[in-house]
Image: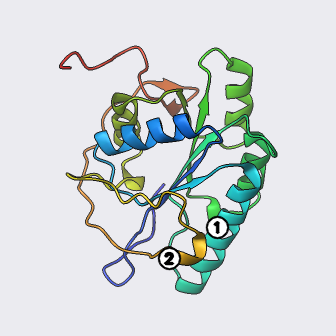
């Protein structure tokens, strides 16, 4: 899966976090920053806000002939629509076909994880996600991430209409072997960095 980009049409590779828990969203943003992820980060608090953001992003991408959101972190349990509803919507949108879909779930909920995979999820992370988990994901799916030194561009609660599209240089990554479940690369949850 490769995003179409060129010198004239740089990739923005935005991240959308769909999470109703402020604490979980904040921890994920911190882990992304600690992992060196520099993609612009946006946050939707519920399913309806996420669908509105995605529809606006698709419209903007068509207008500017640019890629849509590169990475979606999706909580399955939201107050209005479920994460499954959002995955179903994305599956029906060809413009979102290259979006990396990562489910945020409890590790023991195997049935929900299987259902998410059947609806197009590429991977899952247990809450809270760690820096190591995110580095494994970026190694398993290198085309979606902007990785470098320094803080990421987080938009906080910035509205879709006010966001700016900017380009950042992309660091090359050599693909690494990553644990797979049903042929899908996974973060290695049992392994934690011992250098801490």
Q: Nearer the viewer, residue 128 or 119?
A: 128
Give the percent coordinates (x, y) of residue 95. Answer: 64, 67
Q: Tag count in the figure?
A: 2
Quadrant of the rendered image containing residue 123: top right
Which label's residue is closer to the chain start, 1 or 2? 2
Question: Which of the labelled discs sits on residue 116, or is there none?
Answer: none
- The residue at 71%/58% (across/down) is 49
Q: Residue at x 58, y 26 (%)?
A: 182
Residue 61 drawn above or below residue 122: below
Compared with 29, 48 (above or below) is below
Within 10 angstroms of label 2, few (less than 14), some, or many (20 or more) residues? many
Kindly identify which numbered label has been placed on residue 95.
1
Q: Residues within 10 Å of mark 1 (few under 14, many from 20)?
A: some
Mark 2 element type: loop
What residue did someone put label 2 on?
66
Could you say where residue 185 lies in the image, as x and y percent from the top left? 47, 33
Which quadrant of the rendered structure holds the C terminus? top left
Residue depicted at x 46% and y 61%: 155
Query: Going by the image, does 8 lie left or right of 68?
Result: left
Which x, y percent locates residue 111? 74, 21
């Amino acid at each position: 899966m490769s995003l179409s980009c060129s010198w004239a049409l740089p990739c923005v590779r935005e991240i959308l976090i769909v999470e109703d828990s402020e604490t979980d969203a904040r921890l994920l943003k911190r882990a992304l920053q600690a992992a060196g992820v520099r993609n612009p980060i946006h946050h939707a608090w519920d399913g309806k806000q996420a669908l509105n953001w995605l529809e606006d992003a698709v419209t903007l991408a068509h207008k500017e002939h640019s890629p849509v959101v590169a990475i979606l972190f999706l909580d399955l349990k939201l107050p209005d629509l479920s994460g499954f509803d959002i995955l179903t919507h994305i599956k029906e949108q060809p413009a979102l076909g290259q979006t990396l879909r990562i489910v945020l779930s409890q590790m023991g909920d195997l049935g929900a994880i299987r259902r998410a995979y059947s609806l197009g999820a590429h991977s899952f992370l247990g809450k809270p996600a760690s820096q190591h988990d995110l580095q494994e994901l970026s190694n398993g799916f290198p085309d979606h991430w902007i990785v470098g030194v320094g803080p990421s561009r987080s938009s906080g609660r910035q509205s879709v209409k006010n966001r700016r599209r900017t380009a950042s240089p992309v660091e090359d990554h050599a693909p690494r072997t990553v644990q797979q479940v049903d042929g899908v690369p996974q973060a290695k949850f049992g392994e934690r960095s011992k250098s801490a």
